[in-house]
């Protein structure tokens, strides 16, 4: 891939529209210099008094992460409520020229628009959701369907979606194409992103890592390993085992600068215009792969203006899953003990968490992150004179992040939205360290129950499905029994008896909601279940709606066999159902309307679309297919 090198624009990525509440607006961007911003808001409605606002926001919360890179977030408190279900235009004017987005980011505007717009919906009744956006996958980026939907509803506020929920794996830090890693390194150079020292590694610092002969396609040789002393480990795989379990570690991101550059390159087309990522000298066995990945990335970059436009005009909330950090992140107590007790692997995970909080988590609920701002600001200020992050300060910040327990969040409304952190608050098996941990520990489950009390309906975001495909879960249990949970990504709610039992008890509680919708991703295919808890009269009703991936898919032939075998082995009258943890539940799959052979799952990249009635029950469930084909509807069986 080649690019015409352009001068640095004032804004490198964004704005991304994050929270839109009655008296609050949160915007995130990355600038090439510290910008002083003026916000304007203007409503468009005939039946209510017009909104007119112009406010100097200063630089908001601004964190310098490189010589020419500032992450800036604007958390705007408003005196008057934003009108609901009304078109609201906004603009961000830059200092000096006073130019707005039409001048410095015209790619964020639809034809005929002079300013971007958004709608604060009065109810949480129209949601878009998806996970797993892998840039070099051959499918098209599903975010273009979000952009298409917004473009078709520009002048119809009631048809605009309330939220775009990105339910995990917004980046793949552990599965990076060679051309993407080259682009990352060129962008680090262009922006002067800060370097760092690397303790416990074969390379001394980030500069040595980037120049190392193994930095492209052979990074697994540089990643940490540990000595296996357990007899089972020796029997199954030798005495030297990789700390990281991903099968795609050849270009695993390591440094904070690499993580931050990745976010810029997957959320904005502008950084690609600032670099020329030509193919480096590679061993012959990697050149054909590099060219294939470059071709896939060119298609991804071509769609980036559409993705950026969607993120600028639809409120967007996010949560991490494993690939935002690394594959199998915190899957078992043994994984945690190995990774966090090695200085290099601890640094890699910590860097991914720092990048997540700056580029994703912060915008979900800025009030939760006050305790992290001061040490982060101190660390970055100390790096400015030398361009190198001080190792002690970086490790201290990572220590704080690994103890941080506020990644989850709640948005009260009709219905209430609860977004779960199923990665850092896990129910560890202290006596069976190799077996999968529960997705939430006892304390987190108790907090969840308290958040649910006296709500009539709720939407829960669980990155991993609460109720998955039974056959696949059975295979995961088999591998777990054999001592290999990491080989099959054995993490589901039913994999841990204590967590599964506690979650079912929460559903049974008389003060918890009558209607639940659980939105999930992770698995690279889409499906819908309706679940009824048998032991609770008159409910609750639970809908598990899984949409995955935005730009990823499951191997089609393998999924077809899994789906077919699952239907044969776990039909409603099959005695095998009595050997699962779902005996207290009645589970009914919704069927894709475009199925050909009785499929219950849909394998295709895209975005999930969900419409809810006034009681928080699904009215319509669709998959907006990234290939541009007709939408797939999930239909309740008769």
Image: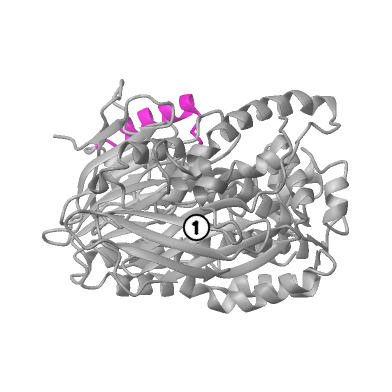
Residue count near mark 1 (Cα–Cα under 10 Å), binned few <14, some 14–19, many ≥20:
many
Which residue is farthest left?
538
Assess whether residue 558 is covered by the magenta stretch.
yes
Q: Give the vertical position of 609 relative to 633 (above or below).
A: below
Assess whether residue 556 is covered by the magenta stretch.
yes
Which residue is farthest top?
596
Residue at left offset 44%, top offset 58%: 18
Image quadrant occupied by the N terminus: top right
Kindly tell me whether residue 173 is visible in this rendering. no
Residue 290 left/right relative to 310 = right
Q: How is the image coloured?
A: one colour
Residue at left offset 18%, top offset 35%: 637
User: Viewer-proximal residue, 420 or 638?
Assistant: 420
Q: Tell me which corner region of the image, top left, top right, bottom left or bottom right, holds residue 602.
A: top left
Q: Return the x and y of residue 417 as percentages of the image width and height.
A: 32, 62
Q: Tell me which corner region of the image, top left, top right, bottom left or bottom right, holds residue 614.
A: bottom left
What secondary structure is the magenta-colored segment mainly? helix
SS for dot 1: strand
Residue 469 left/right relative to 93 = left
Residue 309 left/right relative to 568 = right
Quickly name the residue at label 1. 92
Q: Return the x and y of residue 63 as percentages of the image width and height.
A: 65, 67
User: Viewer-proximal residue, 496 or 313?
Assistant: 313
Q: Return the x and y of residue 319 as percentages of the image width and height.
A: 47, 57
Image quadrant occupied by the C terminus: top left
Residue 62 left/right relative to 234 = left
Residue at left offset 53%, top offset 50%: 480
Residue interval drawn in magenta: 551-571
Kindly tell me whether residue 607 is visible in this rendering. yes
In this rendering, the count of numbered labels is 1
């Amino acid at each position: 891939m080649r690019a015409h090198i352009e001068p640095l624009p004032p804004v490198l990525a964004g704005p991304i529209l994050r929270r839109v509440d009655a008296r609050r607006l949160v915007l995130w961007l990355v600038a090439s210099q510290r910008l002083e911003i003026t916000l304007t808001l203007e409503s468009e409605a005939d039946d209510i008094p017009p909104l007119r606002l112009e406010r100097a926001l200063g630089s908001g919360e601004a964190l310098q992460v490189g010589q020419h890179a500032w992450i800036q977030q604007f958390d705007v408190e408003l005196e008057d409520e934003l009108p609901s279900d009304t078109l609201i235009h906004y603009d961000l004017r830059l200092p000096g020229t006073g130019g707005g987005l039409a001048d410095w980011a015209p790619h964020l505007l639809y034809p005929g628009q002079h300013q971007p717009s958004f709608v604060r919906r009065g109810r949480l009744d129209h949601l878009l959701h998806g996970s797993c956006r892998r840039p070099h996958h051959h499918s098209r980026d599903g975010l273009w369907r979000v952009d298409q939907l917004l473009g078709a509803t520009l002048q119809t506020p009631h048809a605009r979606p309330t939220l775009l929920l990105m339910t995990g794996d917004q980046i793949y830090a552990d599965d990076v194409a060679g051309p993407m890693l080259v682009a990352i390194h060129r962008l680090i150079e262009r922006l002067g992103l800060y370097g760092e020292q690397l303790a416990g590694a074969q390379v001394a610092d980030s500069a040595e890592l980037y120049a190392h002969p193994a930095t492209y396609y052979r990074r697994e040789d540089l990643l940490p390993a540990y000595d296996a002393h357990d007899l089972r480990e020796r029997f199954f795989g030798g005495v030297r085992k990789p700390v990281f379990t991903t099968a795609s570690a050849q270009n695993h991101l390591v440094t904070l600068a690499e993580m931050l550059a990745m976010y810029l390159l997957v959320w904005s087309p502008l950084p690609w215009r600032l670099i020329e990522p030509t193919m480096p000298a590679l061993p012959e066995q990697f050149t054909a792969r590099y060219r294939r990945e470059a071709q896939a990335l060119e298609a991804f970059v071509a769609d980036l203006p559409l993705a950026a436009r969607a993120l600028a005009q639809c409120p967007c909330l996010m949560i991490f899953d494993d690939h935002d950090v690394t594959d199998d992140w915190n899957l078992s107590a043994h994984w945690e003990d190995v990774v966090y007790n090695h200085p290099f692997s601890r640094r890699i995970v910590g860097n991914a968490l720092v990048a997540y909080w700056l580029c994703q988590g912060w915008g979900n609920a800025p009030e939760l992150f006050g305790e992290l701002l001061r040490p982060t600001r101190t660390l970055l200020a100390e790096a400015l004179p030398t361009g190198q992050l001080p190792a002690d300060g970086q490790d201290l910040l990572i220590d704080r992040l690994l103890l941080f327990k506020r990644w989850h969040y709640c948005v009260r409304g009709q219905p209430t939205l609860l977004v779960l952190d199923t990665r850092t608050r896990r129910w560890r098996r202290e006596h069976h360290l190799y077996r999968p941990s529960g997705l939430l520990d006892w304390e987190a489950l108790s907090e969840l129950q308290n958040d649910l009390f006296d709500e009539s309906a709720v939407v829960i975001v669980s990155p991993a499905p609460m109720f998955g495909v039974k056959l696949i879960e059975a295979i995961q249990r088999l591998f777990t029994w054999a001592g290999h949970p990491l080989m099959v990504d054995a993490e589901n709610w039913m994999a841990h008896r204590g967590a599964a039992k506690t979650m079912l008890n929460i559903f049974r509680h008389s003060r918890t909601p009558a209607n639940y919708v659980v939105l999930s991703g992770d698995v690279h295919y889409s499906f819908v279940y309706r679940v009824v808890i048998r032991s609770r009269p008159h409910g609750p009703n639970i809908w598990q709606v899984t949409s995955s991936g935005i730009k990823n898919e499951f191997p089609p032939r393998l999924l077809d066999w899994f789906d077919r075998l699952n239907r044969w082995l776990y039909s409603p009258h099959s005695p095998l159902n009595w050997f699962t943890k779902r005996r207290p539940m009645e589970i009914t799959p919704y069927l894709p309307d475009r199925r050909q052979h009785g499929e219950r799952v849909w394998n295709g990249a895209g975005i999930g679309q969900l419409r809810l009635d006034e009681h928080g029950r699904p009215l319509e469930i669709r998959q907006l297919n990234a290939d541009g084909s007709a939408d797939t509807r999930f239909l309740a069986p008769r």
